[in-house]
């Protein structure tokens, strides 16, 4: 039997593809901080990390807050290295991605917070007061810091967007300025590391827990 053109059209229309002329301004959003906390980490060996955006961070006792960020929030970047293959006529006939890198850039403004100091100097090199500030930093060269990151942000849609990164390394450190009229703050560029049996990172969305 010859295929029915109308049935074919209906089948195509029922797919998940959104028509190009559909515009919905309610689907745009800015990135805003969540009240009470923005970024969290853990210095434990195998911490329990969130697997959704609905769970309250306060129930995940392995996580510690890194406090507030600078007004610029954070930047997520993705870069790829592409190998190009040419034919005899020197035209590109094939490309293949050989490397993919994800990085996060953020500046922490609560520089006397012990957890932030541990990011810069290593967890074993920072002594902590009962109020969560540091009392002593022992600076040792080549301190290799590898930790998870959990980033919470509030969309204009009312949803909580939660980025969960099982493991990052610190690729670079910003200079720290000490001057009147300016905050002492710690800036980092984090590189996402592959963890066995897990994706590089997850991004969850849900209505915030009551």
Image (cartoon, rainbow, N blue to C red):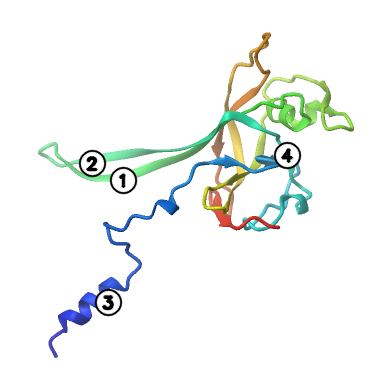
User: Which badge, 3 or 2, comes first in the chain's sequence?
Assistant: 3
Task: Quickly name the residue at label 3.
Answer: 11
SS label for mark 1? strand
Point out residue 94 in the picture as x, y percentages from the top left corner.
Answer: 23, 46
Q: Which residue is drawn at 72% across and 24% down?
A: 111
Task: Quickly name the residue at label 2.
Answer: 85
Q: Residue at x 72, y 50 (%)?
A: 57
Point out residue 78 in the picture as x, y percentages from the top left corner.
Answer: 44, 39
SS label for mark 4? strand
Pointer 2 with pointer 1, Cβ within 8 A: yes
Viewer-side residue, 120 vs 150: 150
Point out residue 102 in the picture as x, y percentages from the top left corner.
Answer: 48, 40
Q: In the rendered view of the protein, which quadrant contains the N terminus?
A: bottom left
Q: How far apart are marks 3 and 2 (CA)?
A: 39 Å
Mark 4 nearby-residue class (10 Å; few <14, some 14–19, many ≥20): some
Q: Could you say which disc has been placed on residue 96 in the image?
A: 1
Locate residue 172: give its quadrant: top right
User: Which badge, 2 or 1, comes first in the chain's sequence?
Assistant: 2
Q: How far apart are marks 1 and 3 (CA)?
A: 33 Å
Task: Quickly name the residue at label 4.
Answer: 65
């Amino acid at each position: 039997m010859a295929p029915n053109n109308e049935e074919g059209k209906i089948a195509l229309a029922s797919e998940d593809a959104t028509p190009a002329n559909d515009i919905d301004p309610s689907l745009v959003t800015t990135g805003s901080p969540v009240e009470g906390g923005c970024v969290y980490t853990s210095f434990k060996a195998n911490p329990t990390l969130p697997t959704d955006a609905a769970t309250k961070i306060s129930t995940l006792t392995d996580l510690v807050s890194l406090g507030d960020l600078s007004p610029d929030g954070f930047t997520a970047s993705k870069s790829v290295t592409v190998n190009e293959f040419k034919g005899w006529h020197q035209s590109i006939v094939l490309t293949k991605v050989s490397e993919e890198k994800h990085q996060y850039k953020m500046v922490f403004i609560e520089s006397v917070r012990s957890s932030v100091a541990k990011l810069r100097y290593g967890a074993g090199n920072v002594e902590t007061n009962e109020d969560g500030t540091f009392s002593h930093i022992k600076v040792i060269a080549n301190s290799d810091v590898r930790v998870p990151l959990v980033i919470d942000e509030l969309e204009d849609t009312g949803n909580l967007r939660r980025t969960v990164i099982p493991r990052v390394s610190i690729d670079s450190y910003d200079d720290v300025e000490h001057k009147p009229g300016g905050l002492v703050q710690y800036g980092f560029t984090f590189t996402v590391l592959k963890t066995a049996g897990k994706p590089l990172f997850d991004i969850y969305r849900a209505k915030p827990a009551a």
